[in-house]
Image (cartoon, helix red, strand yellow):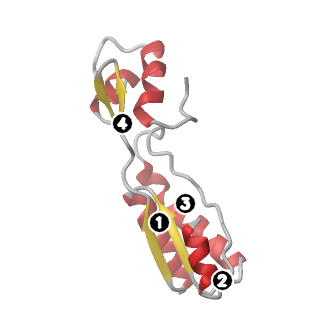
């Protein structure tokens, strides 16, 4: 909202152009495979709209590189505002990020005690998002 207000105060017309989301926490083996797809998505969004400059907003290092690459290919001025790191949650009294404990419960490591019930119950607190699977 503050970005829109700043653009309006500077005499511009802000438009939101939603780009592809990489969903870091649910892609295997890595989101790096999709970085170029996001760069192409950003490029085509900018090509299809008459913009003089762009304010890019994203949340991870791969998103930043992809969005800036799309703007660079289009040769338009760009400012990137990082959203910051994903917040950690709490699961059964322990920190629950998307690191080792999450991998232990999704079956991507050799931990024998994984189960769909455990994985599902850990998804919501690990990502701290309302859209995480229950």
Q: Is residue 34 above or below residue 132?
A: below
Judge depth for marks 3 and 1 and give the one in front.
1
Residue at left 28%, top 17%?
111
Q: Is residue 110 left or right of residue 5?
A: left
Q: Is residue 88 above or below residue 70?
A: above
Depth check: give the residue in front, 29 or 1: 1
Residue at left 62%, top 87%?
52
Residue at left 55%, top 52%?
21
Residue for badge 3: 37
Residue at left 53%, top 74%?
55
**Where residue 13 sits in the image (x, y, percent)?**
69, 80
Depth check: give the residue in front, 126 or 112: 126
Residue for badge 1: 66
Earlier sequence position, callout 2 versus callout 1: 2
Residue 118: which quarter of the image? Answer: top left
Earlier sequence position, callout 2 versus callout 4: 2
Residue 98 badge: 4
**Where residue 28 sits in the image (x, y, percent)?**
44, 39
Earlier sequence position, callout 2 versus callout 3: 3
> Cα distance, mark 1 to mark 4?
22 Å
**Where residue 40 sits in the image (x, y, percent)?**
57, 67
Residue 51 badge: 2
Earlier sequence position, callout 4 versus callout 3: 3
Label 3 with label 1: CB-CB less than 8 Å:
no
- The quarter in which the C terminus is drawn is top right
Earlier sequence position, callout 1 versus callout 4: 1
Mark 3 neighbour density, 10 Å: few (under 14) some (14–19) many (20 or more): some
Mark 4 neighbour density, 10 Å: few (under 14) some (14–19) many (20 or more): many
Give the structural element (helix, strand or loop) at label 4.
loop
């Amino acid at each position: 909202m503050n970005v829109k207000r700043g653009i309006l105060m500077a005499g511009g017309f802000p438009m939101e152009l939603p780009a592809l989301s990489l969903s870091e926490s649910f892609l295997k083996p890595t989101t790096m495979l999709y970085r170029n797809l996001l760069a192409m998505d950003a490029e085509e969004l900018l090509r299809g709209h008459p913009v003089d400059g762009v304010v890019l907003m994203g949340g991870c290092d791969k998103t930043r590189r992809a969005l800036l690459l799309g703007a660079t290919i289009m040769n338009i001025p760009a400012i990137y505002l990082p959203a910051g790191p994903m917040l950690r949650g709490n699961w059964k009294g322990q920190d629950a990020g998307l690191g080792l404990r999450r991998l232990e419960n999704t079956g991507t490591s050799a931990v024998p005690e994984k189960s769909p019930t455990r994985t599902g119950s850990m998804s919501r607190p690990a990502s701290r998002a309302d859209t995480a699977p229950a």
